[in-house]
């Protein structure tokens, strides 16, 4: 299988990563809107990735894998969806209408039941260790598939929290560009002084920069100082910054996504991938429901349901779903057993995710979990899928060598993923495109 995927990936064009923001932590690789990648729709577009991060450990039983009426079922009921024989939680009625465009994986597994460690594992595909920081999936996608026409960051985190996606051993320049209030004005991207005074200041900075370079002739380039300045100025004047703004969107569209940070973030994510941004993460926290689990998921799903459903529908209607992978995932699931506080505790043994677009099989369920509370904590689900296997498959679908070795700053060779892709997760048409 490794040789097969190598042959598929090797035939795809690989570009060298652009120099990117260094000390500012911005991966600035962003075409004027008149030449943006969005003008090329459909399968010929390079794939983008939108990760919807459900922070806190979303319960699979209240969302993608309900077992109503069983000893683990809780208060949730299940409803039919637009995909034959697939039922999901009644808390997600709008997503149910889009399920024909989605795949559910109900058998993800992990050995990390702590929030920080679980988050690191699921965002990178590697269990955390003290000597090496691994890159998030989005950082790898942006690093391996840059676009010289894009003048805004190629890796973006919306409604970000402290556990945003990072570049790891690829470098801080591949950390996600964080936007805490999606849809609002971006801070520090407009000059606070008139143009004449700005140019005067830049001339002064140029003098200092040249002196710095003259005294450090062999190391100045490594700081990426001048590159950072040039890219910052280019971004400040770019028309592509409009992708972060939603004021021009019809009121009906903004209403459909929902008036929440997450809803606005999903709308901005659609605008960013439409412009050509490679990887976007949108965070919805609040799923750590050790107490009143059902009520907590009612509240969170009221924000998740309209935003996710509208995102999938809009991507499909705009002919962008084939070229965008939407991944809705959490650091682990919640226990089948309900605790005395009517909550569910951490449960990494099996949990669920939703994948839509990008050539993944739609209207499909992978894996199954028991409805009874397991007596053996080592019990595994039917047809288990590991996080590294899922990520190897996503990278393969994006035309990225999933097992490419990169030399880390400490001289340690590391593969992007430590697993083989599961080609059965992809549509036949996607596999044929990879072979072409």
Image (cartoon, rainbow, N blue to C red):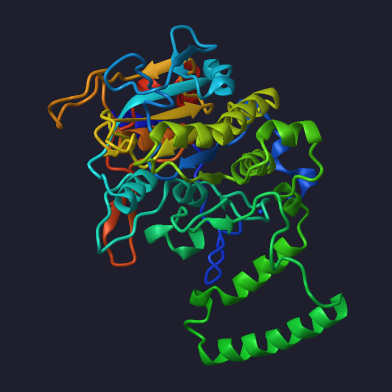
Which residue is situated farthest in the top direction here? 84
Figure quadrant of the N terminus: top left
Quadrant in the rendering for residue 58: top left
Which is nearer the eye, 50 or 118?
118
For this view, does 182 lie left or right of residue 144?
A: right
Which residue is situated farthest in the left direction here? 376
In percent of width and height, residue 215 lies at: 53, 92
Q: Is residue 89 above or below residue 9?
A: above
For this view, does 301 lie left or right of residue 130?
A: right
Give the residue at x 29% y 48%: 126
Q: Is residue 197 above or below residue 87?
A: below
Give the residue at x 42% y 50%: 136
In percent of width and height, residue 45 lies at: 62, 33
Which is nearer the eye, 65 or 360?
65
Give the residue at x 61% y 70%: 228
For this view, does 121 lie left or right of residue 167?
A: left
In percent of width and height, residue 29 lies at: 61, 56
Residue 366 visible, this angle: yes
Residue 11 visible, this angle: no
Which is nearer the eye, 334 or 100?
334
Q: How many labels were placed on the picture?
A: 0
Give the residue at x 48% y 34%: 327
Which residue is situated farthest in the front direction here? 340
In percent of width and height, residue 77 lies at: 43, 17
């Amino acid at each position: 299988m490794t040789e097969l995927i190598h042959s598929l990936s090797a035939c795809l064009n690989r570009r060298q990563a652009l120099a990117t923001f260094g000390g500012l932590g911005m991966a600035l690789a962003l075409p004027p809107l008149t030449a943006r990648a969005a003008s090329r729709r459909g399968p010929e577009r390079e794939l983008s990735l939108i990760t919807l991060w459900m922070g806190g450990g979303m319960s699979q039983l209240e969302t993608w894998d309900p077992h109503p009426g069983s000893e683990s079922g809780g208060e949730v009921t299940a409803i039919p969806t637009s995909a034959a024989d697939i039922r999901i939680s009644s808390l997600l009625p709008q997503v149910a209408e889009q399920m024909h465009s989605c795949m559910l994986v109900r058998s993800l597994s992990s050995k990390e039941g702590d929030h920080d460690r679980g988050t690191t594992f699921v965002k990178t595909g590697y269990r955390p260790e003290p000597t090496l920081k691994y890159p998030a999936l989005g950082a790898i996608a942006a690093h391996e598939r840059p676009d010289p026409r894009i003048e805004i960051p190629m890796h973006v985190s919306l409604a970000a929290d402290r556990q945003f996606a990072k570049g790891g051993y690829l470098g801080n320049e591949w950390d996600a560009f964080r936007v805490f209030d999606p849809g609002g004005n971006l801070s520090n991207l407009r000059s606070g002084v008139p143009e004449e005074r700005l140019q005067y200041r830049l001339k002064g900075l140029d003098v200092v920069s040249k002196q710095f370079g003259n005294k450090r002739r062999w190391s100045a380039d490594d700081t990426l100082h001048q590159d950072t300045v040039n890219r910052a100025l280019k971004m400040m004047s770019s028309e592509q910054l409009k992708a972060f703004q939603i004021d021009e969107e019809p009121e009906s569209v903004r209403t459909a996504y929902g008036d929440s940070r997450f809803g606005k973030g999903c709308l901005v994510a659609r605008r960013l991938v439409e412009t050509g941004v490679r990887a976007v993460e949108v965070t919805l926290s609040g799923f750590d429901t050790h107490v009143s689990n059902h009520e907590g998921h009612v509240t969170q799903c009221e924000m998740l349901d309209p935003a996710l459903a509208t995102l999938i529908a809009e991507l499909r209607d705009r002919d962008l779903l084939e070229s965008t992978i939407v991944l809705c995932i959490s650091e682990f699931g919640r226990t089948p057993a309900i605790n005395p506080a009517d909550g569910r505790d951490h449960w990494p043994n099996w949990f669920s995710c939703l994948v839509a677009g990008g050539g993944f099989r739609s209207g499909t369920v992978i894996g199954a979990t028991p409805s009874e509370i397991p007596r053996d904590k080592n019990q595994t689900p039917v047809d288990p899928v590991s996080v590294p296997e899922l990520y190897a498959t996503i990278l393969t679908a994006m035309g990225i060598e999933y097992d490419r070795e990169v030399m880390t700053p400490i001289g340690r060779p590391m593969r992007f993923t430590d697993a083989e892709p599961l080609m059965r997760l992809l549509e036949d048409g996607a596999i044929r495109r990879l072979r072409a």
